[in-house]
Image (cartoon, rainbow, N blue to C red):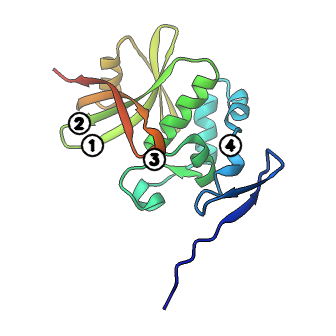
């Protein structure tokens, strides 16, 4: 008979220089707390952000990564796991752009067949551009509808979103419906 035993793990924090107690499953994230501003300071352009993600992260579904259908990783979690899906890449790009003082947001785009995709949209010279996974899309779109059309031409619904607390999913801030 196997007994389940929960063991507290002690981790030497690399950045705080102190002994930190964390729960099992959280150990990988602790060393990355507070590192995001330092990473952001080295990634001064959308292309640098996309290149960083391409070099450092692999693509893996939430089901394979976490055993659940949908999990929005924090940027620190993504740094720890080194793998994620479109929401994780969009959130990482959004946070880096935001830390660098740029206006950005995350957008979910859906079609009528249930396909959904998340990208990070940012404004540059009065036009919308996107970081789509590890690729910068120079859309030069005047409107968000134009962004949706260029990212996924058969889009049906879209939304500006933010990550929910605890990373379970996204929260819709503004919804768009194709007319």
Residue to which mark 3 is pinned = 85
Foreground pick, 136 / 179: 179
Foreground pick, 178 / 23: 23
Pinpoint residue 143: horizontal percent, then vertical percent. 35, 13
Query: Residue at image x 45%, y 47%?
Result: 85
Q: Secondary structure at mark 1?
A: loop
Badge nearest the viewer, 4 or 2: 4
Badge 2 vs badge 1, beta-carbon distance below 8 Å: yes
Q: Secondary structure at mark 3?
A: loop
Pinpoint residue 73: horizontal percent, then vertical percent. 51, 46
Q: Neighbour class for label 3 at 10 Å: few (<14), some, many (≥20)?
A: many
Residue to which mark 4 is pinned = 33
**Residue 111: mark:** 2
Q: Neighbour class for label 4 at 10 Å: few (<14), some, many (≥20)?
A: some
Counting residues from the start of the chain, the first of labels 1 and 3 encountered is 3
Query: Residue at image x 58%, y 41%?
Result: 75
Q: How far apart are the alpha carbons under marks 3 and 2? A: 18 Å
- Placement of 178 over or under 167, stated as above or below: above
Badge nearest the viewer, 4 or 1: 4
Q: How far apart are the alpha carbons under marks 2 and 1? A: 6 Å
Counting residues from the start of the chain, the first of labels 4 and 2 encountered is 4
Query: Residue at image x 44%, y 42%?
Result: 86
Residue to which mark 1 is pinned = 115
Badge 1 vs badge 3, beta-carbon distance below 8 Å: no
Q: Residue furthest right?
A: 17
């Amino acid at each position: 008979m196997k007994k389940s035993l929960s063991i507290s793990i002690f981790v030497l924090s690399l950045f705080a220089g102190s002994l930190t107690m964390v729960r099992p499953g959280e150990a990988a994230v602790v060393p990355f707390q507070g590192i995001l501003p330092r990473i952001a300071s080295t990634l001064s352009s959308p292309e640098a952000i996309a290149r960083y993600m391409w070099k450092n992260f692999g693509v893996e579904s939430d089901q394979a990564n976490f055993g659940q259908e949908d999990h929005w990783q924090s940027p620190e979690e993504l740094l720890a796991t080194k793998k994620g899906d479109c929401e994780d890449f969009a959130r990482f790009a959004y946070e880096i752009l935001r830390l660098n003082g740029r206006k950005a947001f995350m957008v979910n785009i859906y079609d009528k067949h249930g396909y959904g995709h998340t990208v990070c949209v940012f404004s540059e010279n009065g036009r919308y551009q996107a970081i789509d996974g590890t690729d910068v899309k120079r859309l030069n779109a005047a409107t968000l509808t134009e962004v949706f059309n260029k990212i996924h031409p058969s889009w049906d619904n879209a939304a500006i979103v933010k990550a929910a607390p605890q990373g379970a999913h996204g929260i819709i801030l503004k919804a768009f419906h194709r007319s």
